[in-house]
Amino acid sequence: YIFPCYSCGNPAQQMDDTINYLAANNVRLLKKGEVRDSNSTEVGATVGMLWLDIEGTQYWSSSASNNVNFLQGMVDEGNARGVSMGIYTSNSQW
């Protein structure tokens, strides 16, 4: 999970920092459409999806359109890096 930080700014950089941090710590994100090789001898963990955890209205802008644009920036960067993503949230968080 990544907990995006609206007040920290730069959503694309947050996505890059997360992906790079995971890679530096032997956590490999499968690319879209990639299947994990069960015979792999790689060291570390392999995960199939990076989840954006969107919770806590106090962490976000009061503008829904600003929040959507911020999240879109994260998703666009994740897509550019080939990462499979999901969004974890609920109606009450919007």
Image (tube, rainbow, N blue to C red):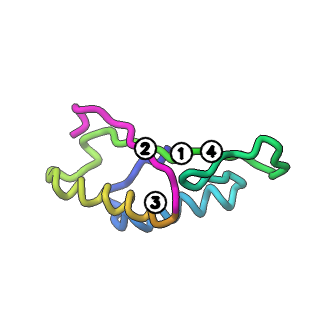
Magenta-span inclusion, residue 89:
yes
**Dot 4, crowdedness within 10 Å: few (<14), some or many (≥20)?**
few
Name the kind of residue labelled 1 in the image: Met
Q: Are marks 2 and 1 in contact (CB under 8 Å)?
A: yes
Say which mark, if any, is on residue 90: none
**Dot 2, crowdedness within 10 Å: few (<14), some or many (≥20)?**
few
Label 2 – label 4 distance at C-alpha: 13 Å
Q: Nearer the viewer, residue 63 or 47?
A: 47
Name the kind of residue labelled 2 in the image: Gly
Name the kind of residue labelled 3 in the image: Gly
Residue 36 image-quadrant placement: top right
Q: Which residues are magenta?
A: 82-94
Label 3 – label 2 distance at C-alpha: 11 Å
Residue 7 image-quadrant placement: bottom left
Say which mark, if any, is on residue 86: 2
Q: Secondary structure at mark 3?
A: helix
The first of marks 2 and 4 along the sequence is 4
Q: Nearer the viewer, residue 37 or 73?
A: 37
Say left or right for 45 vs 84: right
Say left or right for 84 vs 94: right
> Which residue is denoted by mark 4 in the rendering?
47
Answer yes or no: is residue 14 visible.
Answer: no
> Residue at horizontal 42%, vertical 64%?
77
Say left or right for 29 vs 67: right
Q: Secondary structure at mark 2?
A: strand
Q: Are marks 1 and 3 in contact (CB under 8 Å)?
A: no
Q: Where residue 23 appears, x then y in whole percent? A: 66, 59
> Which residue is denoted by mark 3 in the rendering?
78
